[in-house]
Amino acid sequence: MTRRGRVLSFGAAAAAMVAGAIAGAIVGGITGEAIAIAFVSVGAIAVVSLIFLEVGLSEDHEREREREREARDARPARRRPPPLRRRPH
């Protein structure tokens, strides 16, 4: 996930939570409470889901780096040929 995607995703989840709080305060009554609970809940679930996604993606990246490191270490090292020795005259 790109940095922009992260910001937009977490921002949308936070906006849903804020919108729910504002709508609950403006509408009032049981309807306002229902709207507030719904929006805040959806926003909170989205935030938790995105956090789990971030953890999973970071683990995937770490595994990929480890595989690349193992593949690099498994390749035989290139050896230089021994230097040529001159014969004395």
Image (spheres, rainbow, N blue to C red):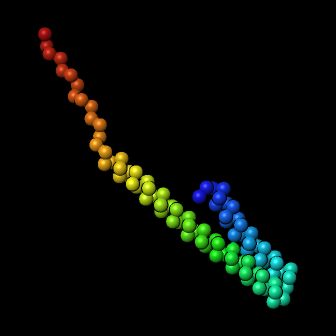
Residue, x 35% and y 52% (percent of image)? 70
Corner quadrant of residue 20: bottom right
Q: Residue furthest bottom?
A: 30
Q: Residue 80 at what x, y percent from top left?
A: 27, 31
Q: Residue 50 at what x, y percent from top left?
A: 60, 68
Residue closest to the eye, 88 or 40: 40
Residue, x 86% and y 80% (percent of image)? 26
Residue, x 24% and y 29% (percent of image)? 81
Q: Residue 48 at what x, y percent from top left?
A: 61, 73
In this picture, is 70 found above or below 23?
above
Corner quadrant of residue 19: bottom right
Count of picture labels: 0
In this picture, is 82 found above or below 7?
above
Q: Residue furthest top?
A: 89
Residue, x 29% and y 37% (percent of image)? 78
Viewed as shown, does residue 1 lie left or right of 15?
Answer: left
Quadrant placement of the N terminus: bottom right
Corner quadrant of residue 31: bottom right
Q: Residue 32 at what x, y percent from top left?
A: 81, 84
In this picture, is 43 found above or below 71?
below
